[in-house]
Image: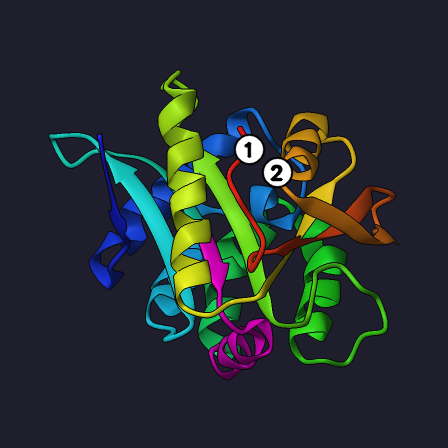
Amino acid sequence: MRLRLAKVCDYQKIAELHFEIRNYYSVGIFAKLGLPFLRTYYRIILNDINAIIVCAEDENGVLHGFCSATLDVRAQLANLKRHKFILALSIFSSIIKNPSIINDLIIRFRVIQNKSKIKIISTQGARSEYWVWRSKNQDSLTSIEMYFAQFNILKALGVKELFGEIDIENKKILKFQLANGGKIIDRILLPDGRERVIVCIDLINWKQRI
């Protein structure tokens, strides 16, 4: 297994792996959207100069995991806003299959547009996004190495604080983050009733502990 930075040409493999994980983690708006959206989303993200995505692949080039972050979440949201029409088109098939997601999409769209008082994600500085690992691969050590490799890259690039969100029900990830220097700085109640915490990691003083 080798680790490397993701390139634009990886967008389809990353989208397919992200789509796969909803078989065992099916909460959140991304879990309700189809492959057309995820392919469009990651093509846009991977063309964003602020995106840092580390991936793990085997000797055959099969992607087993990735973790994504942005150096500037405000710039990322502005970039997504510029691509709102193509993103909206990519969501159409998901709406046909599941019309109940429309309200969630409106909330997310208003966040991107900076027109909502509802807080669902961290909107400052560098943001940690997704940590995805293929469910059939039990090599959790490489998954952790991949995750920390991203931390080291962000630290080397001068990121001092890394923000991210964790749903309270995701107890293992929250415990892991807190054990590795994360501090809860805010709590959010999402429109669907889920409780989420905003976690900040001080990368200046961060050291791997697990």
* Amino acid carrying mark 1 in the image: Arg
Q: Which residue is mark 2?
A: 180
Residue at (49, 65) in percent of width and height: 70
Between marks 1 and 2, how big is the CA–CA gap? 6 Å
54 part of magenta stretch: no
Q: Name the quarter where the N terminus is drawn.
A: top left
Q: Answer with left or right where residue 60 lies relative to residue 71.
A: left
Q: Amino acid at mark 2?
A: Asn
Query: Residue at image x 87%, y 43%?
Result: 193
Q: Is residue 150 visible?
A: yes
- Horizontal and vertical percent position of residue 30: 57, 48
The image quarter containing residue 3 is top left
Residue 44: x and y in percent read 39, 69
Q: Are marks 1 and 2 in contact (CB under 8 Å)?
A: yes
Classify mark 2: helix, strand or loop. Answer: loop
Q: Secondary structure at mark 1?
A: loop
| Dot 2 crowding, Cα within 10 Å, few <14, some 14–19, many 20+ | some
Side (left or right) of 159 relative to 53: right
Q: Residue furthest left?
A: 60
Q: Is residue 107 above or below residue 36?
A: below
In the image shown, does 119 or 54 lie closer to the viewer? 54
Q: Overall secondary structure of the magenta stretch?
A: helix
Q: Is residue 74 magenta?
A: yes
Mark identifier at residue 170: none
Q: Nearer the viewer, residue 89 or 43?
A: 43
Q: Which residues are magenta?
A: 68-83
Q: Which residue is mark 1?
A: 209
